Image (tube, rainbow, N blue to C red):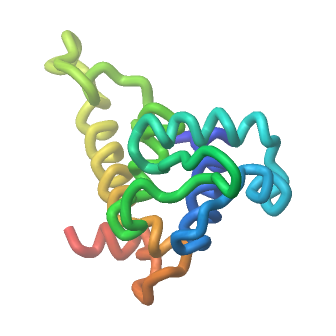
Amino acid sequence: MLVTTKGQYAMRLMIFIARGQGEKIALRRVAEAESISLKYLEQLAHSMVKAGLLVSVRGYGGGYLLGKDPSEISAGDILRVSEGSTAPVNCAGLADACPRESVCSTVAFWTGLDRVIEDYVDGVTLAQLADLEPSPIPSVYDLVERR
């Protein structure tokens, strides 16, 4: 899985807002602190609002708040909203029944890799990323050892 700048900036946006701990955060503030274009942040925030990960508060003193508790938002949630998928390859066998599945020599490998990626990104919360809870971000090796 190649995470684009869209996914990277979405993670930074969400972490910044989570660190605000309930304070309404203006995108202009995020743009300045994170050196990200305000226009780009507006697009990302719109997607996060549509997905229920952020709430937009309009008017004087408005801004953005998390739509859920940061411990209930996973890195996977953010990446799927911003990137569309966390799949490592564009393989029909990962999403649907693939007509080549019975003869494909790689579908089992891609399915396994997809599962590891999904388990990892869904096992890391926004609260962990924003250092709001004491549990450290697990290494991918921890994930493999648990299997």
Residue drawn 31% across and 30% down?
106
Q: Where does the image place residue 140, in percent across and percent down from the top left?
A: 41, 67
In the image as oriented, which residue stretches furthest toward the top? 99
The image quadrant where one finds the C terminus is bottom left
Rendered image quadrant of residue 122: bottom left
Residue at position x 61%, y 62% in the image:
24
Residue 4 appears at what percent x and percent y?
64, 39
Residue at the farthest bottom position: 134
What count of labels does the image hold?
0
Give the image location of residue 69, x and y in percent.
Answer: 38, 66
Q: Residue at x 56, y 35 (%)?
A: 46
Judged left or right of residue 37, residue 81 is left
| Residue 11, horizontal then vertical, whole percent | 58, 54
Q: Is residue 146 above or below residue 60?
A: below
Q: Which residue sits furthest front?
A: 60
Side of 35 relative to 118 (left or right):
right
Q: Nearer the viewer, residue 132 or 29?
A: 29
Position of 34 with respect to 20 (left or right) is right
Q: Is the residue 7 above or below the residue 134 in the image? A: above
Q: Quadrant of residue 51?
A: top left
